[in-house]
Image (spheres, grey):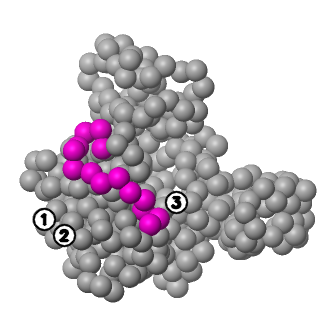
């Protein structure tokens, strides 16, 4: 079976490496020949995921369509599915997950707790909410990722400025700023027949809304871990997911709430490449091609640190020798991206049952790179 991946980023790149032992052919729809995945595969087509014509032409060349990002023409996906093209996840799932308003509605229908939120399109609507007091978080309903599209707002004036800087009619979710005890994430992989596997919940360490480190598994009580697993399973059922569904959660004094979903392999599952029996990428490919799912069991505790670009920093590929020399047992994954500020350029995973030692080892490798 030929799997077509819409997108040529690092997620598609890591799917390719896990497709090789399975004998699965990957073809890519990329924006440019130097996209990270296109650099490691000749089987790509240059086009736009927001072009109905490009999507249709690409879909005609593969057996099943899957995704490495959410910036896709949703009406084109609906049309492809109506015409009998195989999409995994399906157009309905993808549409619900890529729109935060629809996502929260689907979770609410399934009685899955989420942060309280109101959808607004104007600065005055937002200002009225913020005027009630307390800090708030504004989130773009479409397109936000890695902290982009998320704004922390304390005053009505700030809310008017944020909405004023956006395109008129842009939908924004306004949420009260919660007192978080921790942030967790769970990767669940679901097959077309509804069978599924759930990876151990992980803790995520965020800076300015961007994930900087993953601690696997999460160091939480059995009750919290069981609750996180259950919410992940129910979330996958609620949106009828096929393939990987990443479920990001907040832990508050009142328990867990589901903050966000992603219907694709996800940064919070990168540790599974090196610390799990079957990686999230391999299981995603198994699910979308109808193969039996592999074990999600972790054979080691792990810490994954993201390598984030800063202005003036060197290309980590030029410092690879330094990084490898710091820790010969480190798993270094570079994405082939040009350095830009706040851009994820790679990640480092350390498999070590001593958590504090793993954190220190990962930090030293990242510093060397």
Residue 311 drawn at (x, y percent): 60, 25
Which residue sits at x=23%, y=43%? 41
Residue 51 or residue 330, whichever sits in front: 51
Q: Nearer the viewer, residue 327 or 52?
A: 52
Q: Which residue is mark 3?
A: 249
Query: In which quadrant is the C terminus drawn?
Result: top left
Q: Report crowding for label 3: few under 14, some 14 to 19, many 20 or more residues within 10 A (C-alpha).
A: many
Residue that carries the numbered disc 2 in the rendered image: 63
Position of residue 296 measured from the top left corner of the image (x, y, whole percent): 24, 55
Magenta segment includes 347: no
Closer mark to the observer between disc 1 and disc 3: 1
Marks 1,2: beta carbons within 8 A: yes
Q: Earlier in the sequence, mark 1 or mark 3?
A: 1
Residue bearing mark 1? 1
Compared to residue 170, the image places residue 346 above or below, namely above
Decide if residue 198 is in sight here: no
């Amino acid at each position: 079976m030929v799997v077509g991946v819409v997108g040529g980023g690092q997620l598609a790149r890591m799917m390719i490496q896990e497709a090789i032992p399975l004998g699965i052919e990957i073809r890519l729809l990329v924006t440019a020949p130097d996209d990270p995945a296109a650099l490691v595969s000749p089987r790509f087509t240059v086009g736009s995921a927001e072009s109905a014509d490009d999507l249709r032409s690409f879909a005609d060349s593969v057996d099943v369509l899957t995704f490495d990002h959410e910036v896709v023409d949703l009406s084109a996906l609906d049309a492809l599915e109506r015409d009998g093209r195989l999409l995994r996840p399906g157009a309905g799932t993808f549409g619900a997950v890529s729109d935060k308003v629809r996502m929260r509605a689907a979770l609410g229908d399934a009685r899955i707790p989420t942060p309280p939120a109101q959808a607004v399109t104007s600065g005055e609507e937002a200002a009225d909410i913020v005027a009630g007091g307390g800090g708030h978080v504004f989130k773009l309903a479409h397109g936000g990722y890695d902290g982009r599209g998320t704004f922390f707002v304390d005053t009505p004036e700030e809310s008017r400025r944020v909405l004023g800087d956006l395109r008129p009619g842009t939908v924004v979710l306004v949420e009260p700023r919660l007192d978080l005890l921790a942030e967790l994430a769970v990767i669940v992989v679901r097959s077309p027949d509804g069978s599924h596997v759930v990876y151990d919940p992980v803790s995520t360490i965020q800076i300015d809304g961007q994930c900087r480190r993953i601690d696997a598994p999460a160091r939480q009580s059995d009750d919290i871990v069981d609750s996180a697993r259950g919410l992940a399973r129910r979330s996958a059922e609620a949106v009828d997911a096929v393939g990987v569904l990443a479920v990001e959660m907040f832990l508050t004094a009142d328990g867990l709430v589901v903050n966000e979903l992603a219907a694709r392999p996800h940064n919070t599952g990168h540790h599974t490449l090196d610390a799990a029996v079957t990686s999230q990428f391999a299981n995603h490919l198994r699910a979308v091609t109808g193969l039996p799912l592999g074990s999600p069991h972790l054979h080691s505790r792990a810490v994954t640190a993201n390598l984030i670009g800063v202005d003036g920093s060197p290309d980590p590929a030029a410092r690879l020798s330094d990084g490898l020399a710091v820790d010969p047992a480190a798993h270094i994954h570079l994405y082939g991206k040009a350095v830009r500020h706040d851009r994820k350029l790679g990640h480092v995973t350390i498999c070590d049952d001593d958590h504090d030692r793993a954190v220190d080892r990962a930090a030293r490798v990242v510093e060397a790179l």
